Amino acid sequence: MSIRKDDITQQWYFDIEDYIISETDGSGIITYANQGFCEIAGYNIDELLGQPHNIVRHPDMPKIAFKGLWDDVKNKGFWTGYVKNTRKDGGFYWVYATVMRKIDSSGKSSYLSVRVPVLRNVTEQYKEIYAKLRDKE
Ligand SMILES: Cc1cc2nc3c(=O)[nH]c(=O)nc-3n(C[C@H](O)[C@H](O)[C@H](O)COP(=O)(O)O)c2cc1C
């Protein structure tokens, strides 16, 4: 995997081949993260396991986006959307995430997210959409 950083903006980029995967338990605590997730977020796996997933939350993200995520994965079983995340070193990266619910044989829910890169013009669009939503909040 080759990740790149824009030194001026501190935005980090990954490639379309690099799947960024994480899993959580029913309450959003990280139970798995692949190597790609660790690299783009700038953490070791040990620093992520057992932590709430908002460890990568970026302050530019509106609350309503995550309300939508949780409502949809709980009620519909999946959610897709654009997310700006924070790295451990303070940099950031954008992802297009597909979050899904998994239900085990005992009926217990857990969640899985697979992420791909976002086209630059889409990032620009969502920057504005999320800024407006945050203003309202
Ligand atoms: C599988 C899964 C993946 C998630 N991935 C992210 C993520 O990459 N970034 C993020 O900010 N929140 C992610 N969340 C949502 C967080 O659990 C949390 O709701 C969000 O960061 C907002 O934090 P807050 O509820 O403390 O305000 C994910 C949730 C699930 C279930």
Image: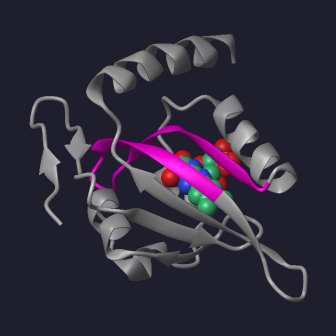
Q: Residue at x 62, y 16 (%)?
A: 133
Image position of 124 with respect to 62: above or below? above
Q: Residue at x 57, y 11 (%)?
A: 132
Instruction: Report which quarter residue 26 is drawn in.
Output: bottom right
User: In the depicted view, which residue is nearer to us: 60 or 116?
Assistant: 116
Q: Residue pushed farthest front?
A: 17
Instruction: Report which quarter residue 31 is drawn in.
Output: bottom right
Residue range (magenta): 77-99
Instruction: Report which quarter residue 53 is drawn in.
Output: bottom right
User: In the depicted view, which residue is nearer to us: 57 or 68?
Assistant: 68
Q: Residue at x 39, y 79 (%)?
A: 45
Residue 93 is inside the magenta segment: yes
Q: Is residue 11 left or right of residue 64?
A: left
Q: Residue pushed farthest left?
A: 7
Image position of 7 with respect to 90: above or below? above
Please state the horizontal and vertical placement of residue 112, each as a whole percent of the image: 60, 66
**Looking at the image, how many numbered discs can be counted on the residues?**
0
Q: Is residue 48 left or right of residue 54?
A: left
Please state the horizontal and vertical placement of residue 124, each as a whole percent of the image: 35, 19
Residue 15 is inside the magenta segment: no
Please state the horizontal and vertical placement of residue 99, each as a whole percent of the image: 62, 55
Please state the horizontal and vertical placement of residue 60, each as a whole percent of the image: 48, 29
